[in-house]
Image: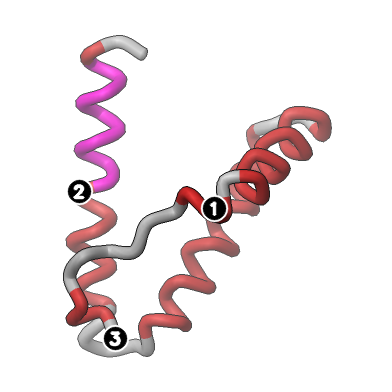
């Protein structure tokens, strides 16, 4: 990825993360996580063809053990 794409990706993550933290004041963390996963999968399903979608969800499944928790324990 280009430096601009990397920066855009980091900016998108940072903006969404800040908003999610605000939402955490109002909603249960599991409800927020479930909503984000649902929205993400729907976006992928919309923008990817069937084969790419299957490959992407397979990659998520295969990386299950590599996913790290957030270090900030205030999410509990």
Q: Earlier in the sequence, mark 1 or mark 3?
A: 1
Query: Residue 61: x, y in percent?
Result: 66, 50
Furthest-front residue in this view: 65
Secondary structure beneath dot 3 equals loop
Q: Residue at x 53, y 73 (%)?
A: 34
Q: Earlier in the sequence, mark 2 or mark 1?
A: 2
Number of other residues with Cα within 10 Å of mark 1, as a class: few under 14, some 14 to 19, many 20 or more: few
Give, as a single range, the part of the protein colored magenta: 4-13
**Residue placed under numbered mark 3 in the picture:** 76
Q: Which image quadrant for residue 2?
A: top left
Q: Is residue 50 above or below residue 24?
A: above
Relative vertical location of residue 13 with respect to residue 50 in this rendering, above or below: below
Q: Residue at x 69, y 32 (%)?
A: 48
56 or 64, nearer to the observer: 64
Q: Which residue is mark 1?
A: 40
- 10 Å crowding of disc 3: few (<14), some (14-19), many (20+): few
Dominant secondary-structure state across the stretch colored magenta: helix
- Which image quarter holds the N terminus? top left
Precedes in sequence: disc 3 or disc 2: 2
Q: Which residue is mark 2?
A: 14
Foreground of the two, 62 or 39: 62
- Left or right of 9 on screen, residue 14: left
Whether residue 6 is in magenta: the answer is: yes
Point out the frontmost of discs 3 and 2.
Answer: 3
Foreground of the two, 46 or 50 = 50
Residue 51: % across, % down: 81, 29
Q: CA distance from mark 3 to mark 2?
A: 20 Å
Q: Is residue 23 magenta?
A: no
The answer to whether marks 1 and 3 mark residues whose Cβ atoms lie closer than 8 Å is no
The Cα–Cα distance between marks 1 and 3, rounded to whole angstroms, is 22 Å
């Amino acid at each position: 990825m280009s430096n601009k794409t990397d920066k855009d990706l980091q900016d998108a993550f940072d903006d969404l993360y800040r908003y999610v933290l605000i939402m955490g004041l109002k909603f249960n963390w599991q409800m927020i996580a479930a909503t984000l996963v649902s929205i993400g999968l729907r976006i992928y399903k919309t923008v990817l063809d069937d084969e790419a979608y299957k490959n992407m969800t397979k990659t998520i499944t295969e990386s299950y053990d590599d996913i790290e928790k957030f270090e900030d324990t205030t999410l509990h």
